[in-house]
Amino acid sequence: MMQLLGDPGTTQYDLRFSILGIPVRVHPMFWLVGLLLGSASPEISLIATWIGCLFVSILVHELGHALAARSFGWPPDIVLHGFGGFARYVPGAGYTRRRAIWISFAGPLAGFGLFAIVLGMHLTLQKGLNAEQPWAINLMQNSVGNSIQFAILQLEYINLVWGLVNLLPVFPLDGGKICFELCDGRHSRSGQVRAYQIGMFAAGLVAFYFANLGMYLAALMFGSLAYQNYQFYTHAKQGFQ
Ligand SMILES: [Zn+2]
């Protein structure tokens, strides 16, 4: 999703598995930060459901990037850590702007796909309940019914809203990487300067917007992204002169 920090390093508590032939490593901080973000929930079952939703959503997002990279012949791996996750690959021959943009876009796109599936489940369940279908009523009266409803709403929110936020033209979000490619930042210093300038202003505006809504954590995150882009910008500009 976002690589705000570098590789968190391996620990003996890392969970390792592979999905669709792609190696995945989950750093223990992933569960800890998930627990902190979900700790406002009143029930332990809802906290567990929230962490499950977070895990599935971030994994699907990174799988989008990873599968796109693999389709070009560059073997990827995925790391989930305390502040999201990332899919890594070493681009080989044939690394073009178009391919780089497609790989960056494939993460949010996979999330939008999951959003569409969950929305379909939501509407089917709603229809069943409205038509007083026994399967829908039994499902909702069951003790897991509460968790299912909660999971549906969380999955919809994470995959739609986080996907859109991730497409903002702020480096190193996916949208920022796309902006970097569109400005030709990989080949020209002036392109880098332009991409970081856009990132700086976009992140500043978004931080202001979130602060106005009282969403201070998001405001703080975009404030620090604005500062990070400002640092990248001054660095790129010094090299350019
Ligand atoms: Zn991503």
Image (cartoon, rainbow, N blue to C red):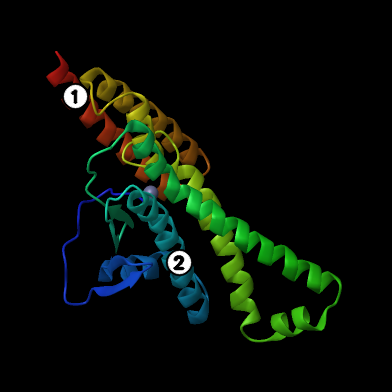
Camera-side residue of 99 and 177:
99
Q: Residue, x 73% and y 63% (percent of image)?
A: 123
Tell me whether circle 2 and circle 1 mark residues in contact (CB < 8 Å). no
Asked if one can make out residue 214 in the rendered structure from this viewpoint, the answer is no
Q: Which residue is mark 2?
A: 56
Residue name at image x 48 percent, y 80 percent:
44
> Which tag is nearer the camera, tag 2 or tag 1?
2
| Lower sequence index among marks 2 and 1 | 2
Amino acid type of the residue tagged 2 in the rendering? Val
> At label 1, which amino acid type do we have?
Ala
Circle count: 2
- Count neighbours of disc 2 (C-alpha within 10 A) and say few if under 14, some if 14 to 19, many if 20 or more: some
Outermost residue toward the top in this view: 241
Residue 210: x and y, percent?
A: 48, 41
The local secondary structure at tag 1 comes to: helix
In which quadrant of the rendered view does residue 239 lie? top left
Q: Position of residue 66 (x, y in %)?
A: 35, 55
Q: In the rendered view, would you say 89 is above or below 144?
A: above
Q: Residue furthest right?
A: 131
Is residue 148 visible from the viewing direction of this image?
A: yes
Any mark on residue 21, and which? none
Tell me the quadrant of the picture where the C terminus can be found.
top left
Residue at coordinates 76% horizontally, 78% vertically from top-left? 136
Q: CA distance from mark 2 to mark 1?
A: 37 Å
**Which residue is at a point 59% across and 70% down the rendered structure image?**
150
x and y percent of residue 101 in the render? 38, 37
Q: Tell me which corner region of the image, top left, top right, bottom left or bottom right, holds residue 114.
A: bottom right
Q: Which residue is mark 1?
A: 236
In the image, residue 174 sits, relative to residue 57, either above or below, namely: above
Relative side of 128 to 154, left or right: right
Does residue 101 lie above or below 116 as drawn? Answer: above
Q: Secondary structure at mark 2?
A: helix
